[in-house]
Image: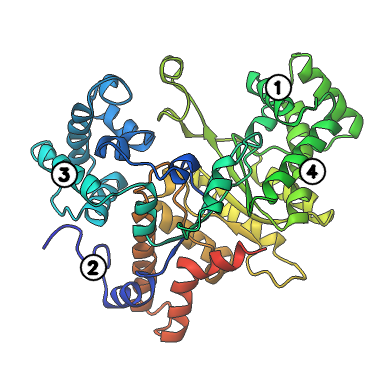
Amino acid sequence: MTFIHDDFMLQNDVAKHLYHDYAKDLPIFDYHCHLDPEQIAEDHQFENLTELWLAGDHYKWRAMRANGVSEDKVTGNASPEEKFEAWAGTAEAAIGNPLFHWTQLELKKYFGIEDLLTSENWKDVYDRANTKLRDEGLTARKLVENSNVAFIGTTDNPTDSLEYHDQIKADDSFDVTVAPSFRPDEAFAIGEEKFTNFLNKLKEVTGKSADSYAELVSLLEERVEYFDERGTLASDHGLTELLYAEATDEEIDTIYVKALAEEDVTKEDKAKYLTRLLTDLSAMYAKRGWIMQIHFGAIRNNNARSFEAIGPDAGFDSINDQTDVAYALNNLLNSMHKNGTLPKTIVYNLNPMYNHIVASTVANFQGNDEGIKGKVQFGAGWWFNDTEQGMLRQMETLADHGLLMHFVGMLTDSRSFVSYPRHDYFRRILCNFVGEQVELGKFPDDEKLLKKLIENVSYNNAIEYFKK
C-alpha cells in the first residue's frame, strides 16, 4: 500500500464513511490566501517544479535551513535542480512535520507520484513532475481548476489598483471567483517607516494627503469603497499584539500628528490609535456586509541579518506572547458591538495558549437580529497551528465553548497554487475526529446529523457566512 492511500489518516470506519461519502468531493471555498492575482490573470506557466513548489514558500525554506541547507539553495542563486535536490533531502528529514504529509499529498494530487520524495529519487521525481507540468499544461488556472476551487480570496494592500482582479472578472473562460481582500496593516504601523511610506503611496493613489486622522479615515473609506465595487467580501488585519485603550478625538489627533512629525510614539499611543482605527474600519466593513478577519500573535523578521539580506516573509517569524489578551479582545469587540458596528468577524490566534481565551471571548458577541449563525468565529488553526494537533486543538476548543456545527472551516493562507491538499488534510482530520467521538459514544451515530456537520464545516458554512 502506498503511503498516501484512500484512507490516509482515517482510523475508523465512521471516519472513512464520512470522508468518502460527504467531505472528499466538496468544492473548496478558499476565503483567505496569498496567491498572486497577476499569475491567475495571466494564467502563469511555471518553468519547473522548483518555481511552483519552492518560490515564496517560507514553510519549506524554514525546514531547509534546519536541515543544514545553505541559503544559496534556499532563496539564493543556485540552479532549480540544486534547490530541488536540497528540498528532497529536507523532505525525508521532515517526518513528523506537516510538511512531510503535505509534500506527499501534493505529489500525488497534481503529478500522480506516489513514491516518497527522498535524496535518492529526487531527479526522477523532478523530471516526472516537470514533464507533467509541461505536457498537461498545469498553469496557475489549471491547478486551481484541478483542485475543485470555487472561490479565492486574495490578500491586497489598500493602495493596490486591483487591475488583475478586473482582468480575471472580465474573462469568461475562467469560472472561479477571485475576490480581493482589504489588508491595511501598514495603516496600523504608526511610528514606523512603513507607516510613512503607506501614507505617501495613499497620496499617489488618491491624489489627496492625509494630514489629519480624519483625513486618513476618509481616504481609507474611499479605498474600501473601491474594493467593494470590485467584489471584496472580507478585510484582514495582521496584528503583532491585541491592544485596547480608549481615547478622545483630541488625543487621537495629537498621536497622529506626532507620528507625521516622526516623533516617538509610545505603546500607549499605539494602543489608543489601534483601538480607534480598528473600530472606525469595522463600521465601514459592517456597512458593506464584509467579514473582518483579525490575525494576531506573529512576531516577524526576528533574524536581523537574514532580514537585511532577504527581506520579509522569508521564514524568520515566530509565535508572540503578550499580556491582557482577554481584556483587549473583549473590549475591542465590545466597543464595536455597543456602537452597532460589529461586522461578521473571524479571530485567529497564533499562540495556542490563547485558544480558550479567544473561543470564550467570541462567544460573548454572537447575538444578532439577522439570524447569522456563528457571527463571530474562532478561526481555523493558523500558520504554526495548521498541523494535525493544531487543527484538533482548535476544533476541540471551539466545541468546548461554542458550536462546532457553525465553524467556517479551513483556508490555505498560502502563496502556492499546489497548497489546496491542505483542505483535504483538514477534512480527513475533521472526519477522523468526529469518527473517533462516535466510536467512543460521545457523538451519536446519527447519519443525518453527522452528514450535516461534515458538509457544513467542510464547505457549506463558508458559502453561507461569506455571502453579503
- Report the residue at 43% width, 47% height from top: 385
Marks 2 and 3, how far apart in space? 20 Å
- Residue type marked 4: Asp
Q: Is residue 65 left or right of residue 426?
A: left
CB-based contact (under 8 Å), mark 4 and mark 1: no
* Closer to the eye: label 2 or 3: 3
- Which residue is disc 1 drawn over? 200
Front residue of this view, candidates 382 and 225? 225
Dot 1 lies on which element?
helix
Q: Which mark is residue 280?
A: 4
Image side of residue 207 versus residue 230, left or right: right
Dot placed on the residue nearer the N-terminal end, 3 or 1: 3
| Residue denoted by label 3 | 117
In contact (CB < 8 Å): disc 2 and disc 4:
no
User: Closer to the N terminus: mark 2 or mark 3?
Assistant: 2
- Is 252 displayed left or right of 43 in the figure? right
**Disc 3 versus disc 4: distance between alpha carbons?**
50 Å
Q: Position of residue 282 (x, y in %)?
A: 74, 48
Q: Circle 2 is placed at which residue position?
A: 7
Residues 36 and 199: in front is 36
Element class at badge 2: loop
- Residue at image point 45% right, 57% down: 173
Rendered image quadrant of residue 328: top right
Amino acid type, residue under disc 1 in the picture: Asn
Kind of residue indicated by mark 3: Leu
Is the residue 367 above or below the residue 199 in the image? Answer: below
Percent from the top left, x then y, of residue 386?
A: 41, 49
Q: Point out the image quarter for the C terminus.
A: bottom right
Q: Position of residue 394 (x, y in %)?
A: 48, 56
Circle nearer the N terminus (3, 4): 3
Label 1 environment density (alpha carbons within 10 Å; few <14, some 14–19, many ≥20): some
User: Taking 315 as reference, is 286 above or below it?
Assistant: below
